Amino acid sequence: MRRVIKYALIAMLFVALAFGSGFYLTLLRLNRGSENTLPDNSKTDEYPGERMNILLLGLDAGTIGADEEHNRYRSDTMMVFSVDPKEKKVNVLSIPRDTRVRISGVGFQKINAAMAYGGPELAVRTVEDFLGIPIHHYVTVNYSGFRKIVDAMGGIEINIEKRLKYDDNAGGLHIDLQPGLQVLDGEKAEQFVRFRHYPEGDLGRMKAQQKFIEAALKTLLKPSTLLRLPQIAQAVQESVKTDIEPMQMMKLANLARQIQQDNVKMYILPGEGRYIGGISYFIPYESEMAEVVKEVFYGENANVKVAVLNGSGYAGIARKVAEQLEAMGFTVVRVANADSFDYDTTTIIYPREKREDAEKIAKVFANAQMKEEESPEENLTTIIVGKDAQSD
């Protein structure tokens, strides 16, 4: 049975090592026991905005021995949350910290170095250039803050499949976790999310972090966790840095109450590890990466390819329909004339294996007919725009 996960977005932001800002304000509102902390103009079930992309940066320990003012933190964990307020969906893309990218003013480096060279602003710009998408906001937290928040929650229950052991004396990191179902306090939770020595390298680490997300979400939703809201809110307030304005935080928190668990999806950037110049990098598979970026940031419609044919005889109407579909995320591969201009009703022709695509497209039109047959365009869903579209 599908159940509504209140604060799902906020919980996901939290357990992704950045603990989103809306989480904090939602907790404050719950703690006050009042629904009246939202400003009058935001008392609505609708989030008044377009898709929002939030970069979440979990920072490493920085340079050992450096003072706080001059410390250079790298992003040990990097995720982009793409929030679709209209569809009430959240997609999460994990980016491996060793991904090889060009950093403006620096050159080719691992993507986690952008934070060290220019703070969250350069990290945002680097991700924008790399993925070809806008980043609207960022949220950062270091591991000290991570430990505080996990402890404030009373720990996270999770099943560890095998022993995780690793020692990095130079970096001050010591990991030793036994297998089995257990409750991880802040220190052990940090060990779990930072362990990297899986057979598949950083990909294994990101899968483990996503497992931690699920476990933390379950913990957050336990009734007993409500008693800890004041401590959690205080820990988040002390640990999180963000450029999201308070008013927008509240609207995000309100939106989060409406997001269903099934509408939060997680993705990992596809690629492989490779040595270049004696340095280990993560190299994305470009074609697969392009498809993932489309799906995560432009919605599932981006993977629906469609041909638009003018069957009405009205000049420009096929282009108009194509632009409408592209604005909704569909991929229009061809715009042309149909075999005739005698179509009174807009018709969607699709091969059997593309029925789901056709149904998505049919929702755009009021009275379109659907026909399952071999379309004029091989293995594509094809729209033949009829005269009825002129009156829409």
Image (cartoon, rainbow, N blue to C red):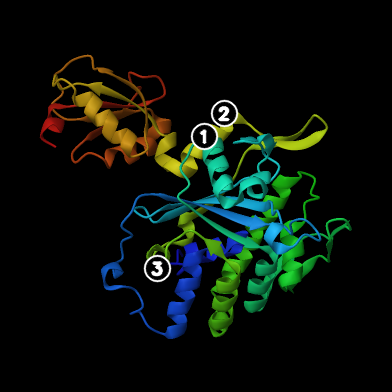
Label 2 to label 1: alpha-carbon separation: 7 Å
Badge 2, how many Cα within 10 Å: few under 14, some, many 20+? few
Label 3 to label 2: alpha-carbon separation: 38 Å
* Label whose residue precedes the other's in the sequence (1 or 3): 3
Q: Residue at x 72, y 51 (%)?
A: 205
Q: Do the residues bearing badges 2 and 1 touch, measured as CB atoms within 8 Å?
A: yes
Q: Residue at x 35, y 50 (%)?
A: 50
Q: Residue 268: x percent and y percent?
A: 61, 45
Badge 3, how many Cα within 10 Å: few under 14, some, many 20+? many
Disc 1 marks a residue whose amino acid type is Glu
Q: Is residue 378 above or below residue 253?
A: above
Location of mark 1 (residue):
291
* Label whose residue precedes the other's in the sequence (3 or 2): 3
Q: Residue 115: x percent and y percent?
A: 64, 49
Q: Secondary structure under badge 2?
A: helix
Q: Nearer the viewer, residue 309 or 212?
A: 212
For marks 3 and 2, give the one nearer the viewer: 3
Q: Secondary structure under badge 1?
A: helix
Quarter holding residue 151: bottom right
Left or right of 293 in this view: 43: left
Quarter holding residue 356: top left
Q: Residue 318: x percent and y percent?
A: 23, 24
Label 1 to label 3: alpha-carbon separation: 33 Å
Location of mark 2 (residue):
287
Badge 1, how many Cα within 10 Å: few under 14, some, many 20+? few
Q: Secondary structure under badge 3?
A: helix
Q: Residue 74: x percent and y percent?
A: 69, 51
Disc 3 marks a residue whose amino acid type is Met
Q: Do the residues bearing badges 3 and 2 touch, measured as CB atoms within 8 Å?
A: no
Q: Nearer the viewer, residue 122 or 33?
A: 122
Location of mark 3 (residue):
250
Left or right of 112 in this view: 200: right
